[in-house]
Image (tube, helix red, strand yellow):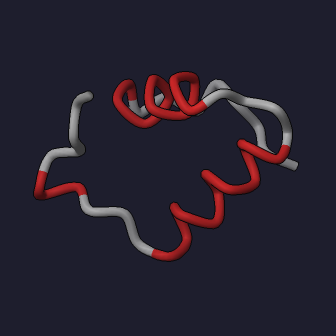
């Protein structure tokens, strides 16, 4: 399992977004892929 780079520690806001993404049915892998790419493809509403 890959770990997040140390200079990109997640703050509470990111943790909340990840929890919301999981609630929408995104898998852990999809969330990690999104974070690694730094894209804004997913709109969490």
Q: Residue at x 11, y 56 (%)?
A: 6
Residue 41 lies, in percent from the top left, at 64, 24
Q: How many marks?
A: 0
Dividing the image into 4 quarters, which one contains the N terminus? top left
In the rendered image, the residue lying farthest to the bottom is: 12
**Residue 15 versus residue 28 in the image, above or below:** below
Query: Is 37 positioned to the left or the right of 24 in the image?
Result: left
Residue 9 lies, in percent from the top left, at 26, 62
Q: Residue at x 55, y 71 (%)?
A: 13
Name the one closer to the observer, 22 or 41: 22
In the rendered image, the residue lying farthest to the left is: 6
Name the one closer to the observer, 28 or 44: 28
The quarter holding residue 35 reads top left
Query: Is 42 positioned to the left or the right of 8 in the image?
Result: right
**Residue 40 versus residue 22 in the image, above or below:** above
Q: Residue at x 54, y 64 (%)?
A: 15
Q: Residue at x 45, y 32 (%)?
A: 32
Residue 30 lies, in percent from the top left, at 57, 23
The quarter holding residue 16 reads bottom right
Residue 25 lies, in percent from the top left, at 82, 32
């Amino acid at each position: 399992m890959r770990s997040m780079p140390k200079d990109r520690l997640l703050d509470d806001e990111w943790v909340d977004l990840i929890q919301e993404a999981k609630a929408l049915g995104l898998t852990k892998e999809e969330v990690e892929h999104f974070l690694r790419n730094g894209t804004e493809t997913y709109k969490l509403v």
